[in-house]
C-alpha cells in the first residue's frame, strides 16, 4: 500500500501543530520545518480545516491550531479522511476498471481485507501517541531548530 503525498503532508502538519500546541503556528514555519512546499501545504491546511482537524485564523496575527485534542485525533481517521475514496487497485475503481477478472478474482477480496486491517491498526494510534514524550521529534519540530538547519 502506498500513501499519497497529501496524507504524508497532513500527518506532518498535524504533528507540527501538536508539538507546538501552546500557540498559533504559521504555514511558512511548517513548510520550512517539515520540508513541504507552501502550495501543497495550503491545500492540505484547507482540507484539514474543512474536516475539523484544524482551526485556522486569518490575518496579520493568524495561524492555525488543532481543532481538537491530539488525544482525540486517530491516525486511521486522518488517513481515511484525507485519502478519501482512492481505489487501492484498478479493480476497485468503478469508472476506470478494465480488468476482466473482477467477477472471479479472490485477490480483490484479499486486498480489501488487507486495507481494512491497515486502517484498523492505525485506529489504535492517536496523534498524541506520535508526539507525546517523543523528545527527538519535538526537537525537530521546534521552529528554532528549523531556522538553524
Image (tube, grey):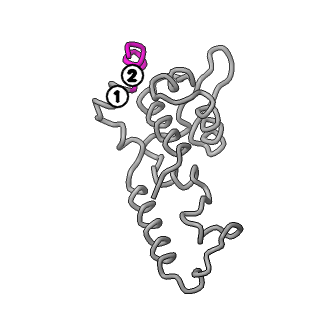
* Distance between the alpha carbons at the discs numbered 2 and 1: 6 Å
Q: Is residue 98 above or below residue 141?
A: below
Label 2 SS: loop
**2 and 1 marks in contact (CB < 8 Å):** yes
Q: Position of residue 67 (x, y in %)?
A: 56, 37
Magenta residues span: 141-149
Residue in view at x 47 percent, y 54 percent: 2
User: Residue at coordinates 49% horizontally, 22% vertically from top-left?
Assistant: 32
In the image, 104 versus 84, the foreground residue is 104
Locate residue 128 relative to residue 48 in the image: left or right.
left
Kindly indicate the quadrant of the structure image that contains residue 92. bottom right
Q: Which mark is residue 142?
A: 2
Q: Residue at x 54, y 63 (%)?
A: 88
In this orientation, which residue lies closer to the viewer: 35 or 43?
35
Callout 2 crowding tier (Cα within 10 Å): few <14, some 14–19, many ≥20: some
- Who's the residue at 71% across and 68% down the image? 95
Farthest bottom residue? 104
Q: Position of residue 123 (x, y in %)?
A: 43, 57
Predominant SS along the magenta part: helix
Say which of 2 and 75 sits in front.
2
Q: Which residue is mark 1?
A: 138
Amino acid at each position: 500500500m502506498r500513501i499519497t503525498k497529501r496524507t504524508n503532508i497532513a500527518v506532518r502538519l498535524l504533528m507540527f501543530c501538536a508539538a507546538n500546541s501552546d500557540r498559533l503556528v504559521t504555514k511558512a514555519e511548517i513548510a520550512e520545518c517539515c520540508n513541504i512546499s507552501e502550495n501543497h501545504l495550503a491545500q492540505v491546511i484547507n482540507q484539514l480545516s474543512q474536516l475539523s482537524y484544524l482551526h485556522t485564523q486569518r490575518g496579520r496575527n493568524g495561524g492555525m491550531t488543532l481543532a481538537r485534542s491530539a488525544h482525540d485525533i486517530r491516525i486511521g481517521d486522518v488517513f481515511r479522511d484525507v485519502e478519501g475514496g482512492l481505489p487501492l487497485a484498478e479493480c476497485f475503481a468503478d469508472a476506470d476498471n478494465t480488468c476482466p477478472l473482477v467477477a472471479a478474482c479472490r485477490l480483490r477480496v484479499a486486498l480489501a481485507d488487507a486495507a481494512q486491517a491497515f486502517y484498523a491498526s492505525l485506529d489504535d494510534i492517536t496523534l498524541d501517541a506520535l508526539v507525546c514524550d517523543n523528545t527527538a521529534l519535538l526537537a525537530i519540530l521546534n521552529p528554532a531548530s528549523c531556522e538553524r538547519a
